[in-house]
Image (spheres, rainbow, N blue to C red):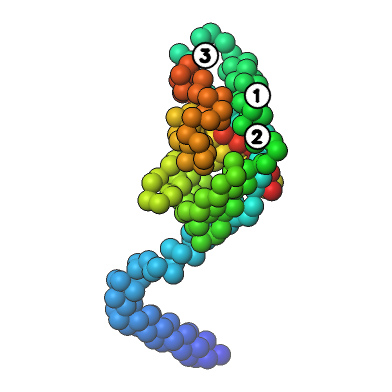
Amino acid sequence: MRQLFLLLGLMVLMSACGTAKQNAAMTNNLHPDEVFTVTEDDIERETRQVNGMIKGEWTFNAPCVDVSGRNFLDGLGKPIAKSKLKKKLNDAYKKIGLYKARPQFTFNDDGTCSIAMLGASLKGSYNYNPDTDKITFKWHGVPLTAHLKRDGKKKLQLTFDADKFLSLISLLSKVSNNSALKALSFLVDHYDDVMVGFELKK
């Protein structure tokens, strides 16, 4: 019986050694590039997964405001300041006509996007980073960065620096000095560190 156990133990040991040598041989045959290379397919797959978080058609639901600067607050609490600005922004959006023809943003998982606003349509691309809550649009080679926060699966908060928001409105407006720009110019002229934009619903 003892000899049988010794024989079985020897067979297991030989098998283990053979497997170890085989694994070592396979490892030695692998080139480092085969282990660590990131292919274009890998990048595209990861990009589509990230973009899938916001993929779809999103429609304007309400104004969205955020503030960050202490000088702007002038001693007021942040919620009070945001509430006051949101009311002004809401009035401006009504003058512009955003409630009649609600802006629509469409994000595709391949990184392309489109915006329909103020009777105009704009197609381009975007790069979304969920770790920083930032999204960079690019139209005709011109980049425009905004903050994008997900609120559950059915809402997005998309806000721009006030001056960049005016640039977007200008880009989509047919008349450069129309009521849209006049109604929103107070944001740039009077307030610092203001982020304005849209609450979007799916």
Q: CA distance from mark 1 to mark 3?
A: 21 Å
Name the residue that disc number 3 marks.
Answer: 73
The N terminus sits in image quarter: bottom right
Image depth: mark 2 or mark 3 in front: 2
Task: Identify residue type, mark 2.
Answer: Gly
Task: Identify residue type, mark 3.
Answer: Leu
Q: Residue at x 52, y 40 (%)?
A: 174
Front in this rendered view, residue 43 or 181: 181
Q: Residue at x 48, y 16 (%)?
A: 190
Residue 153 spot, x, y in % from top left: 67, 48
Residue 28 spot, x, y in % from top left: 29, 78
Look at the picture and state if 63 lies above or below 102.
above
Which label was assigned to residue 97? Answer: 2
Front in this rendered view, residue 94 or 6: 94
Look at the picture and state if 164 lies above or below 25.
above
Residue 77 in sight from this viewpoint: yes
Name the residue that disc number 1 marks.
Answer: 91
Task: Identify residue type, mark 1.
Answer: Asp
Instruction: Say if mark 1 contacts mark 3, CB within 8 Å.
Output: no
